[in-house]
Image (cartoon, grey):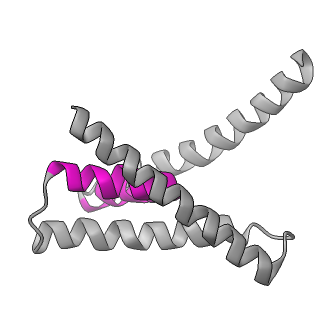
Amino acid sequence: MMYSLLAVAGGGALGAAARYLVYVATTSVFGLEAPVATLAVNVIGSFLMGLWIEAVALALNVSQQAQLFFVVGVLGSFTTFSAFALDFATLYERGRLVLCVLYAGASVVLSIGALFAGLLAAREYL
């Protein structure tokens, strides 16, 4: 358990640092008008998640700690959207198309709704 926790924490530090570097790079090029950094980390992270998962399935023999380090730690702190994309792809590849649509819709609507609920709660009570 402790090695797994350390693997996630170490990967998380690297993923967070990488996310910040993407933010710095994209805002210096595109400014702050559009959330280019968020889009960039979501696309890059999703690509890396697909690449990693398939490489592990087809060719790589990695430890559980290596999986946790990269998937949960690095990619989890770089972008949580990559985890969402993997969950969606897993459902899709299992032929669960209705559940794919429900999952995607619920994730977007409920997450944005929860954000607005948090905004309203803070405005009301702070």
Q: Does residue 10 appear to the left or right of 101 in the view shown?
A: left
Indicate whether 9 appears above or below 86: above
Image point (72%, 37%), residue name: 115
Q: Does residue 122 appear to the left or right of 101 in the view shown?
A: right
Image point (91%, 25%), residue name: 123
| Res. 46 image quadrant | bottom left
Q: Does residue 84 appear to the left or right of 23 in the view shown?
A: left
- The image shows residue 87 at horizontal and vertical percentages of 36, 52
- The image shows residue 105 at horizontal and vertical percentages of 56, 48
Most extreme residue toward the bottom is 29
Quadrant in the picture for the C terminus: top right
Q: Give the range drawn in magenta.
A: 64-93
Magenta region, main secondary structure: helix
Indicate whether 38 appears above or below 25: above
Residue 79 visible in image: no
Count of marks placed on residues: 0
Quadrant in the picture for the N terminus: top left
- The image shows residue 34 at horizontal and vertical percentages of 80, 70
Indicate whether 67 appears above or below 44: above
Residue 2 visible in image: yes
Image point (30%, 47%), residue name: 7
Q: Is residue 85 magenta?
A: yes
Indicate whether 13 appears above or below 32: above
- The image shows residue 117 at horizontal and vertical percentages of 76, 29
| Res. 53 image quadrant | bottom left
Q: Is residue 25 magenta?
A: no
In this view, the residue in front, 33 or 62, is 62
In this view, the residue in front, 49 or 116, is 49
Image point (84%, 69%), residue name: 32
In this view, the residue in front, 93 or 82, is 82
